[in-house]
Image (cartoon, rainbow, N blue to C red):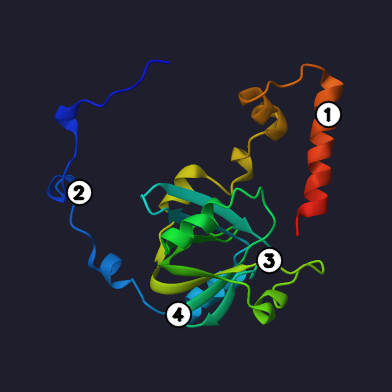
Amino acid sequence: MQTFTPDPDFAITDENGLRGLFPPTHDLALKKCQTTLSHHAQEFIQRSPFLCIGTQNANGKADVSPRGDPAGFVRILDDRTLAIPDRPGNNRLDTLSNLLSNPNVGLLFIVPGFDDTLRVNGRAALTTEPELLNSMTVNDRAPKLAIIVHIEEIFFHCAKAFRRSHLWSADHLQDRKAMPSLVEIILDETTGAPQDAAEKRKLDDDLEEEYRRTLY
């Protein structure tokens, strides 16, 4: 595939050039930003089983990671502080190591069936406080640590993106079998995927077993 190079004559290089492409921001879009959790924001977080967390390392390299658990898994500690349990993953620790060098964090809370979302921006820290971790126990397993987020900005985001994507529409669900399994994709991109169907099935079965053993 040929490398794409943008035409510099059409590059947007400053904020004046950017904002000149769009009408002025609606006054309500500016006023909706809050610094503390309203009762509406608290209810949304308590309903949410899923969020995306955006971080950067000290050099500004960005990363976004999903977090999911039973609805309400994010603890509301006070009207400006949240706690996110860290469940077992692939141990790359991208999010956690980023937060050690750059505490700035962005969260996007999602509720199944809701087209609007909740955005939280703030600063994060990591803790192993036993009482807090024990309160986040699922299936008799407490997380090894939690991410504490001190809120600096919070606001609800409109439904346009979800409505454009038809994310919750059953008519737009895609068949996962239309692409190779996760194991096959990773092997194909690294050491080479097996061609034997029985071996592929075994790898998929092994992954499902690992999910079962290490989900918490």
Q: Amino acid at mark 3?
A: Lys
- State which tag comes first along the sequence, 2 or 4: 2
- State which tag comes first along the sequence, 2 or 1: 2
> Which residue corresponds to mark 2?
22
> Which residue corresponds to mark 4?
80
Query: Looking at the image, can residue 27 be seen?
Result: yes
Q: Quadrant of residue 170?
A: top right
Q: Nearer the viewer, residue 170 or 155?
A: 155
Query: Looking at the image, can residue 179 be seen?
Result: no
> Which residue corresponds to mark 3?
144
Q: Nearer the viewer, residue 203 or 171?
A: 203
> Residue drawn at (68%, 66%), measured in percent from left and top?
144
Question: Distance from label 2 to label 4 (Cα)?
Answer: 33 Å
- State which tag comes first along the sequence, 1 or 3: 3
- Locate residue 100, reporting x and y percent: 47, 62
Query: Crowding near pointer 3: few (<14 within 10 Å), some, many (20+)?
Result: some
| Residue 201 numbered tag | 1
